[in-house]
Amino acid sequence: MLSKILLFPYYLTLKVRHHLYDTGARKVHHCEVPTICLGNITAGGTGKTPHTEMILRTLLGLPEWKDRHLAILSRGYKRKSRGFQQVKTDSPASFSGDEPLQIKKKFPEVTVAVDRNRVEGCQFLCHPEILATNKKARKCQDKDMQKADLIILDDAFQHRSLQCWFNIVLIDYNRPVDKDNLIPFGHLRDLPERLDQADMLIVSKCPRYLDETEREQRIHSLGITDFDPVHCCGTNRKGKKVTVLFTSISYCPLERIYEEGDNRYIYSKKLILFSGIAKDTPLQKYLSDDYSIIKHFTFSDHHKYSKGDIQKISRAASSHPTAIVATTEKDSQRIADVKEVPQILREKLFEVPIEVVFLTEEEKTVFTATLIQALEDFQTRDLK
């Protein structure tokens, strides 16, 4: 009610926009290869990047997809480049955005591209040969790529002009949608009813254990009825079958960022932490189990590190000679853009990789099976 009354113009704009797409008044495009959309309806981190990586690991582990050509299409948030660009492992974060660069470094065999126009981006990925002649691609610096057999779209749920084949929507466990409001009174950037368009809902950033009562409450709050816990499937308010799964973040052992990094610092008892992400409280808690955090620098999400920022962190590192310096994977991509990083920081600077894990093995099995079925359905869509 708060959103509908105090933010009525914003609420009405969203309602009208979705109505135009739903009724066909605005054109909706489809891609010729299967597309998996990973998105959310809230602002701030719900874990899209580690979930994208999890989808890639799943597909690359399947016999029918491990030798196919997979592609990632992202907007490339806060990048300086324009138009469609292919991301390479040696691309600067300022060119591609930190998240696409992180994915490319982890999966060098996968094509990673950025384009604000998702319809256009999918067209280029499906027909890379037109990059040489298309006027809209004249700024593309690297046009050598293979035709995509499947495209995963990062944060494209609000891009209604492109109808993806399979929509996965993430919901932060710590921010229940039914208790949230539209921006700026809350974190919602879209209407809660948009969840009814999802094929799969994933409640992310959960504690590692949830009892059945809390699971049922969460599922019920999403408007899901007739939930089958064996197949993790229920019926939403529109009568559509939807899969509901729960994931958590798993922190991996620290890894050095620079070649001259000294692994002996990992065994230190003191730690200096800095980050430029939406929320680093879980990371603090994880590191606090093994280290005493003696200094903590917080920057805005996707912060571009300046020479002054590096000097400030370096001074703290010099003041605590035995302390390790840690940051996130995303931050490490942006740190690489800074030309002058003092040697003392290069030796002590480590990143904390993260992975997404399902709360149960059964959920992991359901996820894989649901993904396989969705892709098989795409292949037979014209035969039905």
Image (cartoon, helix red, strand yellow):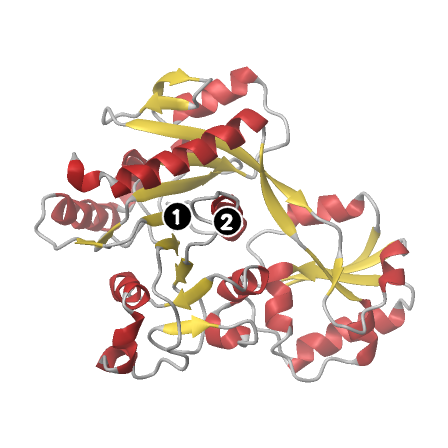
**Cα gap from disc 1 to disc 2, whole angstroms:** 21 Å
Residue at point 42%, 29% (across, down): 244
* Position in image of residue 359 (x %, y %): 58, 30
Residue at point 32%, 46% (across, down): 190
Contact flag, marks 1 and 2 (Cβ < 8 Å): no
**Is residue 198 visible in the rendered structure shown here?**
no
Please say if 34 is above or below 333.
above
Q: Is residue 172 left or right of residue 360?
A: left
State which mark lies toward you, 1 or 2.
2
* Position in image of residue 301 (x %, y %): 54, 61
Q: In this figure, which residue is indicated by the disc labeled 1?
A: 39
In the image shown, does 334 or 148 lie closer to the viewer? 148
* Position in image of residue 199 (x %, y %): 33, 35
Residue at point 34%, 73% (across, down): 84
Residue at point 48%, 76% (across, down): 95
Please say if 129 is above or below 219.
below
**Number of callouts in the render?**
2
Quadrant in which residue 353 is drawn: bottom right
**Circle 2 crowding by C-alpha within 10 Å: few under 14, some 14–19, many from 20:** some
**Is residue 26 visible in the rendered structure shown here?**
yes
Q: Amino acid at mark 1?
A: Gly
Quadrant in which residue 122 is drawn: bottom left
Q: In this figure, which residue is indicated by the disc labeled 2?
A: 60
Local secondary structure at mark 2:
helix
In the image shown, does 195 or 374 lie closer to the viewer? 374
Q: Amino acid at mark 2?
A: Leu
